Amino acid sequence: MSDVRHVLVLPDRDTAEEVAGELADRFGVAEEPQLVRDALAGEDDAEDAQWLVIVEDPAGRLDPASLDAFAAEYEGWLEVP
């Protein structure tokens, strides 16, 4: 099985940091999720940036539907590859 990577899209950095911290508690994610600022195309204003929380899932054990519902609690979503 190939490595699986889940990308959660969140509205701001504070929310992304909160979600990253909560992933370990709720889903047992062992590896620290990576936070990436995703500036919207053509936007230089930091206020218009979304934040991505990238979760490595080498065993493929995380349920995408559960991750999407979790992100929705924070006004985010799971990016579908």
Image (cartoon, helix red, strand yellow):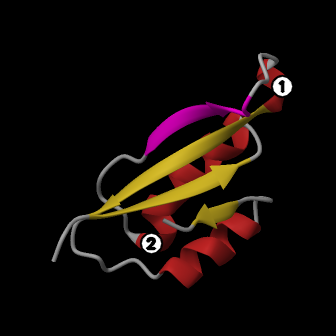
Query: How many dots with numbers?
Result: 2
State whether residue 54 is above or below residue 1: above
Q: Residue at x 80, y 59 (%)?
A: 75
Image x and y of residue 28, in percent: 38, 69
Q: Is residue 44 left or right of residue 18?
A: right
Q: Is residue 29 left or right of residue 7?
A: left
Labels 1 and 2 touching (C-beta < 8 A): no
Image x and y of residue 15, in percent: 71, 45
**Amino acid bearing label 1:** Glu
Task: Tell me how far mark 1 sits from mark 2, CA to CA.
Answer: 29 Å
Q: Residue at x 84, y 25 (%)?
A: 47
State the SS at label 2: helix
| Residue tagged 1 | 47
State whether residue 56 is above or below residue 51: below
| Residue tagged 2 | 27
The quarter of the picture where residue 52 lies is top right
Image x and y of residue 19, in percent: 60, 53
- In the image, residue 40 lies in the stretch drawn in magenta: yes
Question: Which residue is the extreme one toward the left?
Answer: 1
